[in-house]
Image (cartoon, grey):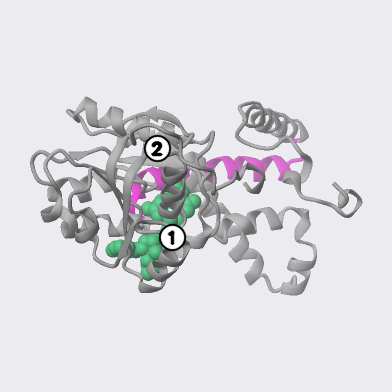
Amino acid sequence: MGSHRVDETAAAPAGAPMVGRLAIIGIGLIGSSIARAARQHGLASSIAIADASPAAMAEASRLGLGDSCGTDAAEAATDADLVILCVPVGAMGQVGAAIAGALKPGAIVSDVGSVKGSVVAQLGPHLPEGVHLVPAHPVAGTENSGPGAGFASLFHNRWCIITPPEGADPQAVETLRAFWAGMGANVETMSPERHDLVLAVTSHLPHLIAYNIVGTAADLEQVTRSEVIKFSAGGFRDFTRIAASDPTMWRDIFLNNKDAVLEMIGRFNEDLAALARAIRWGDGDALFELFTRTRAIRRGIIDSGQETAEADFGRRHDDDATA
Ligand code: NAP
Protein backbone atom coordinates (compact mmCIF):
# COMPACT_ATOMS: atom_id res chain seq x y z
CA MET A 1 0.00 0.00 0.00
CA GLY A 2 2.91 2.31 0.76
CA SER A 3 3.62 2.97 -2.91
CA HIS A 4 0.11 4.45 -3.36
CA ARG A 5 0.58 7.19 -0.79
CA VAL A 6 0.44 10.77 -1.97
CA ASP A 7 1.42 14.07 -0.36
CA GLU A 8 -1.06 14.61 2.49
CA THR A 9 -0.16 18.23 2.91
CA ALA A 10 -1.30 19.13 -0.61
CA ALA A 11 -3.65 22.14 -0.68
CA ALA A 12 -7.40 21.53 -0.97
CA PRO A 13 -8.86 22.35 -4.41
CA ALA A 14 -10.76 25.63 -4.84
CA GLY A 15 -14.59 25.64 -4.96
CA ALA A 16 -17.42 24.99 -2.52
CA PRO A 17 -17.07 21.80 -0.43
CA MET A 18 -19.47 18.97 -1.26
CA VAL A 19 -20.79 18.73 2.31
CA GLY A 20 -20.93 21.24 5.16
CA ARG A 21 -20.16 19.68 8.54
CA LEU A 22 -18.73 16.16 8.37
CA ALA A 23 -18.80 14.10 11.56
CA ILE A 24 -16.56 11.06 11.87
CA ILE A 25 -17.32 8.72 14.78
CA GLY A 26 -14.37 6.38 15.43
CA ILE A 27 -11.00 7.75 14.35
CA GLY A 28 -9.02 4.57 13.68
CA LEU A 29 -7.47 3.44 10.41
CA ILE A 30 -10.58 4.09 8.30
CA GLY A 31 -11.97 7.15 10.11
CA SER A 32 -8.61 8.92 10.11
CA SER A 33 -8.07 8.10 6.42
CA ILE A 34 -11.46 9.67 5.62
CA ALA A 35 -10.54 12.75 7.69
CA ARG A 36 -7.26 13.12 5.81
CA ALA A 37 -8.75 12.46 2.35
CA ALA A 38 -11.76 14.76 2.93
CA ARG A 39 -9.40 17.52 4.04
CA GLN A 40 -7.00 16.98 1.15
CA HIS A 41 -9.76 17.03 -1.46
CA GLY A 42 -11.71 19.87 0.17
CA LEU A 43 -14.87 17.74 0.50
CA ALA A 44 -16.22 19.22 3.77
CA SER A 45 -16.32 22.73 5.20
CA SER A 46 -15.57 21.39 8.69
CA ILE A 47 -14.73 18.04 10.30
CA ALA A 48 -15.91 17.02 13.77
CA ILE A 49 -14.40 13.89 15.28
CA ALA A 50 -15.48 11.69 18.18
CA ASP A 51 -14.01 8.47 19.52
CA ALA A 52 -14.73 6.53 22.70
CA SER A 53 -11.02 6.14 23.32
CA PRO A 54 -9.39 9.16 25.05
CA ALA A 55 -5.99 7.95 23.77
CA ALA A 56 -7.25 7.89 20.15
CA MET A 57 -8.77 11.36 20.63
CA ALA A 58 -5.50 12.74 21.97
CA GLU A 59 -3.63 11.33 18.99
CA ALA A 60 -6.24 12.67 16.53
CA SER A 61 -5.89 16.14 18.11
CA ARG A 62 -2.12 15.96 17.93
CA LEU A 63 -2.31 14.96 14.26
CA GLY A 64 -4.79 17.80 13.57
CA LEU A 65 -7.28 15.42 11.93
CA GLY A 66 -10.40 17.47 12.70
CA ASP A 67 -11.63 20.97 13.52
CA SER A 68 -13.00 19.57 16.77
CA CYS A 69 -12.21 16.38 18.67
CA GLY A 70 -14.02 14.85 21.65
CA THR A 71 -15.34 11.67 23.19
CA ASP A 72 -19.04 12.61 22.81
CA ALA A 73 -20.47 11.19 19.56
CA ALA A 74 -23.75 13.16 19.89
CA GLU A 75 -21.84 16.42 20.17
CA ALA A 76 -19.90 15.66 16.97
CA ALA A 77 -23.11 14.68 15.14
CA THR A 78 -24.94 17.88 16.11
CA ASP A 79 -25.63 19.99 13.00
CA ALA A 80 -23.68 17.55 10.82
CA ASP A 81 -24.71 17.13 7.19
CA LEU A 82 -22.91 13.81 6.87
CA VAL A 83 -22.13 11.48 9.78
CA ILE A 84 -19.89 8.48 9.08
CA LEU A 85 -19.64 5.74 11.69
CA CYS A 86 -16.16 4.18 11.59
CA VAL A 87 -16.42 1.95 14.65
CA PRO A 88 -16.36 -1.89 14.82
CA VAL A 89 -19.50 -3.52 13.37
CA GLY A 90 -20.65 -4.67 16.83
CA ALA A 91 -20.71 -1.05 18.11
CA MET A 92 -22.89 0.44 15.33
CA GLY A 93 -26.23 0.10 17.17
CA GLN A 94 -24.83 1.66 20.34
CA VAL A 95 -23.44 4.66 18.43
CA GLY A 96 -26.70 4.98 16.44
CA ALA A 97 -28.64 5.21 19.72
CA ALA A 98 -26.20 7.78 21.10
CA ILE A 99 -26.38 10.17 18.11
CA ALA A 100 -30.07 9.76 17.16
CA GLY A 101 -31.33 12.72 19.21
CA ALA A 102 -28.64 15.05 17.87
CA LEU A 103 -29.23 14.49 14.15
CA LYS A 104 -30.74 17.32 12.15
CA PRO A 105 -33.47 16.70 9.53
CA GLY A 106 -31.92 15.94 6.13
CA ALA A 107 -28.66 14.63 7.62
CA ILE A 108 -27.07 11.61 5.97
CA VAL A 109 -25.89 8.82 8.25
CA SER A 110 -23.42 6.39 6.75
CA ASP A 111 -20.82 3.91 7.99
CA VAL A 112 -17.82 1.93 6.76
CA GLY A 113 -18.59 -1.43 8.38
CA SER A 114 -17.35 -4.58 6.69
CA VAL A 115 -20.78 -6.25 7.07
CA LYS A 116 -23.89 -4.48 5.77
CA GLY A 117 -27.06 -6.45 6.62
CA SER A 118 -26.34 -6.35 10.34
CA VAL A 119 -25.40 -2.64 10.26
CA VAL A 120 -28.68 -1.71 8.54
CA ALA A 121 -30.56 -3.77 11.15
CA GLN A 122 -28.64 -2.17 14.04
CA LEU A 123 -28.82 1.45 12.85
CA GLY A 124 -32.19 1.69 11.09
CA PRO A 125 -34.44 1.54 14.16
CA HIS A 126 -32.60 4.41 15.90
CA LEU A 127 -32.69 7.01 13.12
CA PRO A 128 -35.44 9.63 13.26
CA GLU A 129 -37.78 10.45 10.36
CA GLY A 130 -36.13 12.75 7.81
CA VAL A 131 -32.61 11.39 8.39
CA HIS A 132 -31.18 9.37 5.49
CA LEU A 133 -29.38 6.08 6.11
CA VAL A 134 -26.91 5.23 3.31
CA PRO A 135 -24.46 2.52 4.44
CA ALA A 136 -21.17 1.97 2.64
CA HIS A 137 -18.06 -0.23 2.79
CA PRO A 138 -14.71 0.85 1.38
CA VAL A 139 -12.93 -2.31 0.27
CA ALA A 140 -9.56 -0.95 1.31
CA GLY A 141 -7.47 -1.31 4.42
CA THR A 142 -4.30 -2.51 6.02
CA GLU A 143 -3.57 -4.73 9.02
CA ASN A 144 -2.84 -1.63 11.17
CA SER A 145 -5.23 0.22 13.50
CA GLY A 146 -5.57 3.62 15.13
CA PRO A 147 -5.48 7.29 14.06
CA GLY A 148 -1.78 7.17 13.14
CA ALA A 149 -2.31 4.23 10.75
CA GLY A 150 -4.51 6.14 8.28
CA PHE A 151 -3.42 7.92 5.11
CA ALA A 152 -5.22 10.12 2.57
CA SER A 153 -4.73 7.88 -0.45
CA LEU A 154 -6.07 4.69 1.19
CA PHE A 155 -9.23 4.73 -0.95
CA HIS A 156 -7.59 5.83 -4.17
CA ASN A 157 -8.51 3.43 -7.01
CA ARG A 158 -10.14 1.08 -4.48
CA TRP A 159 -13.80 0.02 -4.52
CA CYS A 160 -16.37 1.49 -2.19
CA ILE A 161 -19.64 -0.45 -2.11
CA ILE A 162 -22.76 1.56 -1.25
CA THR A 163 -25.75 -0.44 0.00
CA PRO A 164 -28.78 1.89 0.14
CA PRO A 165 -31.84 0.38 1.82
CA GLU A 166 -34.98 0.08 -0.30
CA GLY A 167 -36.62 3.49 -0.78
CA ALA A 168 -33.45 5.43 0.11
CA ASP A 169 -33.46 9.10 -0.93
CA PRO A 170 -31.73 9.29 -4.38
CA GLN A 171 -30.16 12.68 -3.59
CA ALA A 172 -28.62 11.35 -0.37
CA VAL A 173 -27.26 8.30 -2.24
CA GLU A 174 -25.80 10.57 -4.92
CA THR A 175 -24.15 12.82 -2.30
CA LEU A 176 -22.47 9.80 -0.68
CA ARG A 177 -21.41 8.40 -4.05
CA ALA A 178 -19.84 11.76 -4.98
CA PHE A 179 -18.14 11.98 -1.57
CA TRP A 180 -16.39 8.61 -2.04
CA ALA A 181 -15.57 9.36 -5.67
CA GLY A 182 -14.08 12.65 -4.41
CA MET A 183 -11.67 10.61 -2.25
CA GLY A 184 -10.59 8.68 -5.36
CA ALA A 185 -12.69 5.54 -4.86
CA ASN A 186 -14.53 3.61 -7.56
CA VAL A 187 -18.12 3.34 -6.34
CA GLU A 188 -20.47 0.39 -6.84
CA THR A 189 -24.00 -0.06 -5.51
CA MET A 190 -25.51 -3.38 -4.37
CA SER A 191 -27.96 -4.79 -1.83
CA PRO A 192 -26.71 -5.45 1.72
CA GLU A 193 -27.40 -9.19 1.28
CA ARG A 194 -25.39 -9.41 -1.94
CA HIS A 195 -22.55 -7.43 -0.34
CA ASP A 196 -22.38 -9.82 2.62
CA LEU A 197 -22.24 -12.90 0.37
CA VAL A 198 -19.59 -11.44 -1.96
CA LEU A 199 -17.40 -10.25 0.93
CA ALA A 200 -17.77 -13.60 2.72
CA VAL A 201 -15.85 -15.18 -0.19
CA THR A 202 -13.42 -12.41 -1.04
CA SER A 203 -12.51 -11.17 2.44
CA HIS A 204 -14.07 -12.95 5.41
CA LEU A 205 -13.17 -16.56 4.47
CA PRO A 206 -9.56 -15.65 3.51
CA HIS A 207 -9.13 -13.93 6.88
CA LEU A 208 -10.54 -16.95 8.70
CA ILE A 209 -8.18 -19.26 6.81
CA ALA A 210 -5.22 -17.00 7.66
CA TYR A 211 -6.15 -16.84 11.35
CA ASN A 212 -6.56 -20.61 11.35
CA ILE A 213 -3.33 -21.50 9.56
CA VAL A 214 -1.22 -19.16 11.68
CA GLY A 215 -2.84 -20.58 14.81
CA THR A 216 -2.25 -24.15 13.63
CA ALA A 217 1.42 -23.51 12.81
CA ALA A 218 1.94 -21.84 16.17
CA ASP A 219 0.42 -24.86 17.96
CA LEU A 220 2.32 -27.57 16.09
CA GLU A 221 4.50 -29.63 18.37
CA GLN A 222 6.65 -31.41 15.76
CA VAL A 223 7.89 -28.09 14.33
CA THR A 224 9.30 -25.60 16.79
CA ARG A 225 8.12 -22.01 16.81
CA SER A 226 11.60 -20.78 15.89
CA GLU A 227 11.54 -22.98 12.76
CA VAL A 228 8.12 -21.57 11.78
CA ILE A 229 9.49 -18.03 11.97
CA LYS A 230 12.85 -18.88 10.36
CA PHE A 231 11.33 -20.55 7.28
CA SER A 232 8.24 -18.33 7.02
CA ALA A 233 9.10 -17.09 3.51
CA GLY A 234 7.84 -20.46 2.25
CA GLY A 235 4.28 -19.04 2.26
CA PHE A 236 3.42 -18.74 5.96
CA ARG A 237 4.70 -15.13 6.14
CA ASP A 238 2.05 -13.87 3.72
CA PHE A 239 -0.73 -15.37 5.86
CA THR A 240 0.70 -13.68 8.97
CA ARG A 241 0.05 -10.22 7.50
CA ILE A 242 -3.67 -10.93 7.25
CA ALA A 243 -3.72 -12.75 10.59
CA ALA A 244 -2.31 -9.61 12.26
CA SER A 245 -5.59 -7.75 11.55
CA ASP A 246 -7.50 -6.16 14.43
CA PRO A 247 -9.07 -8.83 16.72
CA THR A 248 -12.11 -6.71 17.72
CA MET A 249 -12.96 -5.80 14.14
CA TRP A 250 -12.72 -9.39 12.90
CA ARG A 251 -14.56 -10.93 15.85
CA ASP A 252 -17.45 -8.58 15.04
CA ILE A 253 -17.35 -9.39 11.31
CA PHE A 254 -17.68 -13.15 11.87
CA LEU A 255 -20.41 -12.76 14.48
CA ASN A 256 -22.39 -10.38 12.26
CA ASN A 257 -22.04 -12.21 8.93
CA LYS A 258 -22.63 -15.64 10.41
CA ASP A 259 -24.87 -17.23 7.74
CA ALA A 260 -22.84 -16.22 4.68
CA VAL A 261 -19.53 -17.15 6.35
CA LEU A 262 -20.83 -20.57 7.50
CA GLU A 263 -22.10 -21.21 3.95
CA MET A 264 -18.63 -20.42 2.53
CA ILE A 265 -16.86 -22.55 5.16
CA GLY A 266 -19.04 -25.48 4.07
CA ARG A 267 -18.04 -24.99 0.42
CA PHE A 268 -14.39 -24.56 1.39
CA ASN A 269 -14.36 -27.78 3.44
CA GLU A 270 -15.82 -29.75 0.50
CA ASP A 271 -13.21 -28.39 -1.91
CA LEU A 272 -10.41 -29.04 0.58
CA ALA A 273 -11.59 -32.64 0.97
CA ALA A 274 -11.44 -33.02 -2.85
CA LEU A 275 -7.86 -31.71 -2.84
CA ALA A 276 -6.88 -34.10 -0.05
CA ARG A 277 -8.34 -36.97 -2.10
CA ALA A 278 -6.38 -35.87 -5.20
CA ILE A 279 -3.14 -35.85 -3.20
CA ARG A 280 -3.87 -39.21 -1.55
CA TRP A 281 -4.63 -40.94 -4.90
CA GLY A 282 -1.87 -39.22 -6.84
CA ASP A 283 -4.29 -37.34 -9.12
CA GLY A 284 -1.73 -34.83 -10.44
CA ASP A 285 -4.03 -33.71 -13.27
CA ALA A 286 -6.66 -32.47 -10.79
CA LEU A 287 -4.03 -30.51 -8.86
CA PHE A 288 -2.45 -29.07 -12.01
CA GLU A 289 -5.83 -28.04 -13.44
CA LEU A 290 -6.81 -26.18 -10.23
CA PHE A 291 -3.42 -24.45 -9.86
CA THR A 292 -3.62 -23.30 -13.50
CA ARG A 293 -7.08 -21.79 -12.92
CA THR A 294 -5.98 -20.03 -9.73
CA ARG A 295 -2.91 -18.56 -11.42
CA ALA A 296 -5.24 -17.01 -14.03
CA ILE A 297 -7.33 -15.46 -11.23
CA ARG A 298 -4.26 -13.69 -9.84
CA ARG A 299 -3.43 -12.46 -13.36
CA GLY A 300 -6.97 -11.00 -13.55
CA ILE A 301 -6.52 -9.16 -10.23
CA ILE A 302 -3.24 -7.66 -11.44
CA ASP A 303 -4.73 -6.70 -14.81
CA SER A 304 -7.60 -4.90 -13.05
CA GLY A 305 -5.08 -2.73 -11.16
CA GLN A 306 -5.94 -4.14 -7.69
CA GLU A 307 -2.47 -5.65 -7.04
CA THR A 308 1.15 -5.11 -8.02
CA ALA A 309 2.58 -7.35 -10.76
CA GLU A 310 5.96 -7.34 -9.01
CA ALA A 311 7.15 -10.71 -7.76
CA ASP A 312 6.87 -11.42 -4.02
CA PHE A 313 4.38 -8.53 -3.56
CA GLY A 314 7.07 -6.03 -4.54
CA ARG A 315 9.22 -6.78 -1.48
CA ARG A 316 12.73 -5.41 -1.71
CA HIS A 317 15.49 -7.99 -1.80
CA ASP A 318 19.18 -7.51 -1.05
CA ASP A 319 20.24 -7.42 -4.69
CA ASP A 320 17.82 -4.58 -5.54
CA ALA A 321 18.46 -2.50 -2.42
CA THR A 322 19.85 0.31 -4.53
CA ALA A 323 16.48 0.88 -6.24
P1 NAP B 1 -9.77 0.90 14.37
O1 NAP B 1 -8.52 1.40 13.74
O2 NAP B 1 -9.67 -0.10 15.48
O3 NAP B 1 -10.62 2.16 14.89
C1 NAP B 1 -11.88 2.05 15.48
C2 NAP B 1 -12.00 3.17 16.50
O4 NAP B 1 -13.37 3.22 16.95
C3 NAP B 1 -11.13 2.94 17.73
O5 NAP B 1 -10.46 4.12 18.11
C4 NAP B 1 -12.16 2.52 18.79
O6 NAP B 1 -11.77 2.83 20.12
C5 NAP B 1 -13.35 3.36 18.38
N1 NAP B 1 -14.60 2.89 18.94
C6 NAP B 1 -14.97 1.62 19.27
N2 NAP B 1 -16.22 1.61 19.76
C7 NAP B 1 -16.65 2.89 19.76
C8 NAP B 1 -17.84 3.53 20.18
N3 NAP B 1 -18.86 2.81 20.66
N4 NAP B 1 -17.95 4.88 20.04
C9 NAP B 1 -16.94 5.61 19.53
N5 NAP B 1 -15.76 5.05 19.14
C10 NAP B 1 -15.62 3.72 19.26
O7 NAP B 1 -10.75 0.25 13.30
P2 NAP B 1 -10.79 0.43 11.68
O8 NAP B 1 -9.85 -0.54 11.08
O9 NAP B 1 -10.73 1.87 11.33
O10 NAP B 1 -12.26 -0.15 11.41
C11 NAP B 1 -13.42 0.64 11.61
C12 NAP B 1 -14.57 0.08 10.79
O11 NAP B 1 -14.15 0.02 9.42
C13 NAP B 1 -15.00 -1.33 11.17
O12 NAP B 1 -16.40 -1.41 11.16
C14 NAP B 1 -14.43 -2.20 10.07
O13 NAP B 1 -15.25 -3.35 9.82
C15 NAP B 1 -14.43 -1.25 8.88
N6 NAP B 1 -13.41 -1.50 7.85
C16 NAP B 1 -12.12 -1.78 8.22
C17 NAP B 1 -11.16 -2.02 7.26
C18 NAP B 1 -9.73 -2.35 7.64
O14 NAP B 1 -8.97 -2.89 6.82
N7 NAP B 1 -9.29 -2.06 8.85
C19 NAP B 1 -11.51 -1.95 5.90
C20 NAP B 1 -12.81 -1.60 5.54
C21 NAP B 1 -13.76 -1.38 6.54
P3 NAP B 1 -11.11 1.61 21.00
O15 NAP B 1 -9.81 1.29 20.36
O16 NAP B 1 -10.99 2.20 22.38
O17 NAP B 1 -12.08 0.47 20.94
> Magenta segment: does it hold 4?
no
Q: Earlier in the sequence, mark 1 or mark 2?
A: 1
Q: Which mark is residue 197?
A: 2
**Mark linked to residue 64:** 1
Q: Position of residue 104 (x, y in %)?
A: 13, 46
Observer-nearest of 280 and 198:
198
Please report the residue visible at 77 percent of the width from the left and 56 percent of the height from the top.
233
**Would you identify the image quadrant in which residue 166 lies?**
top left
For the image shown, how many numbered marks are present on the structure?
2
> Dot 1, how many residues are within 10 Å of its Cα: few (below 14), some (14-19), or many (20+)?
few
Whether residue 250 is visible to the viewer of this picture, yes or no, is: no
Residue 234 in the image: above or below residue 229: above
Give the Cα distance between marks 1 and 2.
38 Å
Q: Amino acid at mark 1?
A: Gly
Q: Is residue 269 magenta?
A: yes
The x and y percentages for residue 127 are: 14, 47
Q: Quadrant of ligand 1?
A: bottom left
Q: Amino acid at mark 2?
A: Leu
Element on which disc 1 rests: loop
Left or right, 201 with reference to 171 = right
Q: Is residue 287 visible?
A: yes
Q: Main secondary structure of the magenta part?
A: helix
- The residue sitting at 21% across, 51% down in the picture is 122
Residue at 72% of width from left, 45% of height from top?
A: 313
Q: Nearer the viewer, residue 276 or 65?
A: 65
Start-end of magenta stretch: 254-283
Task: Please tell me whether mark 2 sits on a helix, a strand or a loop.
Answer: helix
Q: Is residue 76 left or right of residue 241?
A: left
